[in-house]
Amino acid sequence: MSAGATAPATTYEPVIGLEIHVQLDTRTKMFCGCELSFGDPPNTHTCPVCLGMPGALPVVNAQAIHSALTIGMAFGCELAPRSIFHRKNYFYPDLPKGYQISQFDVPICRGGHLGDVRIHRVHLEEDAAKLVHVGASGRIHGADASIVDYNRGGTPLVEIVTEPDVRSAAQAREWLTLLRETLRQLGVSDVNMEEGSLRCDANVSIRPAGSDALGTKTELKNMNSFRYLERGVEAEIARQVALVEAGEAVRQETLHFDPVSGSITSLRSKEEAHDYRYFPEPDLVPVVLTDAMRDAAAARLPELPAARAERYERELGLTAESARLLAFRAELAAYFERALAGAPTTSEGESLVWGHPQALANWLTGELAARLGDADPAASKVAPEALAKLVALVRSKQVTPGAAKQVLDALVAEGGDPEAIVEAQGLGAIGGGDELAEIVARALASDPDAVAKLKGGNMKAIGPIVGFVMRETKGRADGGEVNRLVREQLGI
Amino acid sequence: MIDRPQVLHVARLARLELDDAQVERMARELSSVLDHVEKIGELDLEGVEPAAQVVDVVNALRADEPRPSLPRDVALATAPEVVDDGFGVPTPGAG
């Protein structure tokens, strides 16, 4: 077959929507006064309401409403003037009432967006209890047994549903990082994926690139880390592409991704939406948005990561990458701003790093972050003012970048003042004085071969000369100055 | 008219086991309930706001303050079986 007769391979575009469950970090449960707990002995935080005793009446936790409204405001959602709760009916041992109190057609928030992904809705509901399968214990009539711990049952949950705006597994992971950081900075949840306070499902479908149609979607459940989310979605996209290319149809189903084997398996066929027999919760009255509720939520909004990154780009001229690195880690952003504020000034009162916050950002997200890992720099021995001073020393060429790394090592180990460290360890840059000229002369004398090449116009040969000088000066020589002296001494 | 498959479907969702006579009786009774609702549906409700509640109360909220929980032995007194301080149940879907 000639190349021209080969049909072009179809490329597929993934269409991904995310559903995220967030446990709110209120003190008490959604509908009763039992305290929230993680890791407490089983069944020590229950009452007739969260055990589903007949006749027990739920009462809505005002703080959960407040948190949901705060989240809605952060996304720019439309806040429902009046929202109601519904019963979602199904039987499972982790749901003692036989229904979950949730919201159905009138969620508390609708619309809005976070970053480049639109939000479909945000609603409130209660978490199920924890069900642990213990296998055949022989204690329960010899059958396969499970144990229910109702401590978690009734924990306030916010469910966030996005529009299908995500186009790759990597974007899904990236966006979830933004969501987690946003929720953390809102102070509404501890957003710990390992402990289950942030849980993510993904709706995945594929379509030929360029098409507007939506393919049949599958729901990938409960990926409990950012890495698993990315790998799970990637695996599901690959599975769907393989099915379609083999001429088979994608079936709508709920799937489980096993991160160990990388395999995807079908869960029990999901009951259809109408099988949940939603109806308005008769034991709860509507929640009507008041000005006081709106003001309280607005007062709680900090500057959020997306807005902060945008401001760093606009006002400080940081690169998008640096702005994102700083803004998406609140502790880095806080440290950065303290360092900027504490930067040394010239005799004219001009900040030595204000003109170039990018240099400070690079040292913070590069060298310092590399030395501290995930730790909060504010908890390190390096004061923000000290980092700013070090960057200023580099910018004013009093210290070379190489020597500054040694100063930073000393700051991380012992703290202190960068100027004092430079003084004590003799790390100050060797400027244009006779000392450097003498070292350059020795370097040239030691390498006639390089000198010949340089004179012949091959400037690459300057490498060994600069290397010699840096070794001699322990990195304290300014590269530009060495370059100038070489040219001067060789007359080139 | 509610037919037999519909009754069996609803019974399965409610985890009820019905014998043939009960299925037939439920089909009849559920149909009459639906007929009654349809009768109500004939009312002219043009311009009437849908109501999910009959009481004229909104924002019955509770301050986020802990209240004592039940002692565990009292909570577990209603368990079908107690296993490792938890409610022991047959594993859903097993056996």
Image: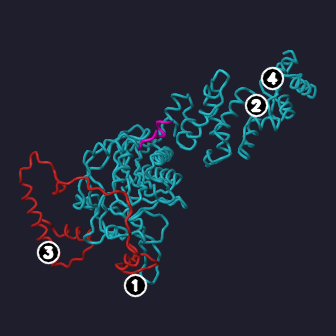
Task: Specify the amino acid type for callout 3.
Answer: Glu
Residue type for callout 2 = Val
Report which residue position mark 1 lands on.
Answer: A141
Please name whichever residue, A137 or A481, is drawn nearer the observer in this view of the structure.
A481
Badge number at residue A263: none
The residue identified by callout 4 is A483
Q: Position of residue A153 (x, y in %)?
A: 38, 65
- How many angstroms separate mark 2 from mark 1 (CA)? 77 Å
User: Same chain for marks 1 and 3?
Assistant: no
Tell me the chain of label 1: A
Question: Does dot 2 land on a helix, a strand or a loop?
Answer: loop
Tell me the quarter of the picture where residue A94 sits: bottom left
Left or right of A473, for residue A48: left
Q: Residue at x 45, y 84 (%)?
A: A138
Kind of residue sitting beneath label 1: His
Which chain's residue wears label 4? A
Residues in magenta, as a range = A300-308
Q: Chain of mark 2?
A: A
Residue tagged by mark 3?
B24
Given this view, does label 2 or label 4 mark the residue nearer the observer?
Answer: 2
Where does the image place residue A119, in percent across and percent down from the top left? 37, 44
Q: Which mark is residue A399?
A: 2
Contact, CB < 8 Å: mark 1 with mark 3?
A: no
Chain appearing in red on the rendered image? B
Residue type at mark 4?
Asn
**Within 10 Å of the Cα at label 2, are there few (<14), some (14-19), or many (20+) other Cα atoms?**
many
Where's the C terminus of chain A, which quadrant?
top right
